[in-house]
Amino acid sequence: MSASPIADRWIVLKFGGTSVSRRHRWNTIGELAKKRADETGGRVLVVVSALSGVTNELTAIADGAADSRARVAALVARHNEFLAELELGEEVLAHRLAALQALLDDPRAASRPLDWQADVLGQGELLSSSVGAAYLRSNGLDFGWMDAREWLHALPPAPNQTAWSQRLSVNCKWQGEADFKQRFSAQPTRMLISQGFIARHEDGGTAILGRGGSDTSAAYFGALLGASRVEIWTDVPGMFSANPKDVPDARLLTRLDYYEAQEIATTGAKVLHPRSIKPCRDAGVPMAILDTERPHMPGTSIDGSAEPVPGVKAISRRNGIVLVSMEGIGMWQQVGFLSDVFNLFKKHGLSVDLIGSAETNVTVSLDPSENLVNTDVLAALSADLSEICKVKVIVPCAAITLVGRGMRSLLYKLSDVWATFGKERVHMISQSSNDLNLTFVIDEADADGLLPILHSELIDSGAMPVYEEQVFGPRWREIIGSIRPRQTPWWQAPGKRQKLLELAAVGTPAYIYDLDKVRERARQLKAIGAIDRRYYAIKANSHPEILRTLAAEGFGLECVSQGEVEMVFASVPGMPAERVLFTPSFAPISEYQAVLARGVTVTVDNVELLQRWPEVFRGRALWLRIDLGHGDGHHKKVNTGGKDSKFGLSALRVDEFIAAARALDIRITGVHAHLGSGIENSGHWKQMVDEMAGFARRIGSVEILDIGGGLPVPYSDDDEPFDLDAWAAGLAEIKAVHPAFQLAIEPGRFMVAESGVLLTHATQVVEKDGVRRVGLDAGMNALLRPALYDAWHDIANLSRLDDARDVDFSVVGPICESSDVFAQRVKLPATTMPEDVMLIADAGAYGFSMASTYNQRALPREDFIDA
Ligand code: ADP
Ligand code: ASP
Ligand code: MG
């Protein structure tokens, strides 16, 4: 070894459990360490966790599990197998594994004092770092091995710190160690490997940094060495806007400041130990979170120079929260009550997280610290508290926290979030005084499934500004490649585009429908064997060419008014009446009479119709629409189930309906239910058909179950196309369970949305206070969905389709309403100018059919392409 001094610029790389459990990852570790040393011309310290799952085993052994010997034997076998995978001999770990086994025969094992527990827990990192050093050396890398306990020293106990945390959840000295760097840099090798999680206790024994504490070990080393960077290598490529394993749409956060990162870590994002940030922040050491399996991804950078971007950055969840509610007798203005209460928390070494107070009640939350979980401190606290007040402990709770800069100024964007919580039982709401978080405490059971919903609400409302590209990166689903891509829109094909430009020249605004696209959708549904009958819900778009096209594809046509029925017979010559459905809601009785006279199948949805107009329905065959009592869908205005919905017969009145129908000699041949529109959840279909089949059997004469429509359409880049194959497979299973019934569907949107575009001309391009607006000659009168449902439609400049879409525009119409906005922020070419042909995509469903002449603006033209 050369005696010449090696540069003393350090970089610290920490690898977590999954990163050290496989051979190929150790190859990556070696490559990365060497690369960093070469890039910086400096030195590298690798800090490692135990192999994944090992600390859990050691925790059970430290807790005195009855099968501790078997667990130790399994750990020995696991490490020997790993040595074999690495083509290393068992002698590499022989003495360490012997030390692990010896701990069971240690005289302390009987009473399991905390120092013995710390020795047990520390074995995992000692083993993994020893294996790693041997493997890296066998690959020709010059690595030195260090015992972290020689370098990291636990701080002396803080006042009120419990004995447990003084040993098993310690903080370490990381300041004022003047010669640390000099001594450390005197090590002879350029690259070193050491353990996370362990330190030296004041008494010379082992101390533990708490679960997940290896991140903090790396941060201490980084701060003590004044490292150029601390890199946390794990199994996800950074900190995300939510735990990506729970919320697949979570976005990578590419850049955070220390304070936001701290808040996200503290409120539940396990990816970074909350105590690891302060040492780096105070020492000015930048941090990065990176993925060992995807080492080329840029990850998350955390430093002091990130430009603050207001908005919610992340949503996290902590389980196992304990709420302690304390009811004081005559507490109002009772001097010293709070102080008495908090003294008791202090006495038991419990730190309070959230506080809510009322005249006679104080409620506080306690984090699920290991102290709380592992000891009976809560019972002791309750006993003490009950001396001075009435105590109620509410467990288990979950705390759901929104983190980001400027929470207070975001409240107006959170109405959907509040509404979603409104459906659960919120025990406590707390807003942090640093304006960085807003926390809701609810029962743990109520929190399940909530995060993906809240996350998408935060994006839709603009509270989470995912368009800020310097902060928000790709979605987890994109990174792991599990996204089904959207089709390239038909209108981008050169031939179609040319045709559209010609049609725009005839006059705009104009809806143009591509009949090929309509046929494509029809054929996709025809290919699904489990479906016996297909109807097209013409309210989505009743253009005669579309009706003819779908009728020619074998679709029946479903109408909701007499006008639509007349439209069908006028547009589709020879349309047999038995392929037409009439499913009205609160229509005048004259419409039922007229439509029944044409021989069309009518769906009824209430008993009162039969009672009031028995002769209209006597002796008929009818379908019955039932409200199954719950709804679903992309927006509350299209949710068509439940008590607040006007649609369908209440499930509670089905027997009454059956009796009324029998008395009039009516045969109920179909049962229909429709839960809403744009439904993504495939499980709901099965539940729905099971319920419908139950009613159908009760009725007796039913042949057809009509499961409605509701197939979603991917309007935005963030949406995936509906998984028709999975749906078809689900329907086949359903059909197998209920072979007695034919299945009918009646989609509208799915058939036509993507076939239609709204062509417009740009009127004016205006800049105001930093916002660029392009006005169109079509407004909310032409396409109502964005104003009514906050719906997203992609917008393109058809005249400049080949130019880069490089600037954010707000796209607005000419109507005198502030909601006359098609999109707040859409990327369009900077060159966009008046007279350009602008295209609004996916406008074939509920476009023209909902258009009006508001402001005395003419209805758009309609035309079609049939190539
Ligand atoms: P390591 O063993 O490498 O220390 P951890 O399991 O401690 O890894 O942390 C990584 C895990 O943190 C991820 O697999 C992920 O499931 C979880 N996690 C929770 N919240 C977040 C978040 N907001 N961003 C990224 N990961 C998160
Ligand atoms: N091995 C320890 C644990 O599992 C420390 C760590 O991995 O950060 O908690
Ligand atoms: Mg961790």
Image: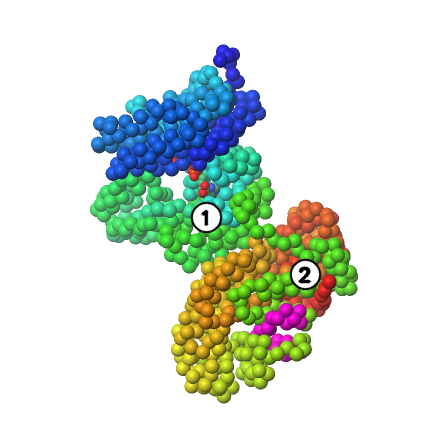
Instruction: Find the magenta span and give its range.
Output: 547-570
752 displayed left or right of 168: right
Q: Which mark is residue 808?
A: none
Considering only vertical position in the picture, is 84 above or below 539?
above
Query: Hey, what amino acid is under mark 1?
Result: Asp
Element marked by disc 2: strand
The question of residue 28 being in magenta is answered with no
Rendered residue at 43%/40% (across/down): 270
57 displayed left or right of 389: right
- Quarter of the view holding residue 196: top left
Which residue does the numbered mark 1 point to in the structure image? Answer: 246
Residue sitting nearer the eye, 564 or 418: 564
* Residue furthest to the bottom: 615
Q: Earlier in the sequence, mark 1 or mark 2?
A: 1
State the count of labels: 2
Q: Estimate the spatial distance between the alpha carbons at disc 1 and disc 2, rounded to whole Å.
A: 36 Å
Expressed as whole percent of the image width and height from the top left, the position of residue 453 reads: 48, 54
Considering only vertical position in the picture, is 212 above or below 499?
above
Expressed as whole percent of the image width and height from the top left, the position of residue 135 reads: 45, 25
Residue sitting nearer the eye, 533 or 266: 533
Rendered residue at 39%/73% (across/down): 652
144 displayed left or right of 786: left
- Is ligand 1 within 8 Å of the beta carbon of the residue shown at mark 1? yes
User: Which image quadrant: the C terminus?
Assistant: bottom right
66 displayed left or right of 251: left
Which residue does the numbered mark 2 point to in the structure image? Answer: 757
Query: Hey, what amino acid is under mark 2?
Result: Val
Rendered residue at 75%/57% (across/down): 495
Expressed as whole percent of the image width and height from the top left, the position of residue 207 reads: 33, 28
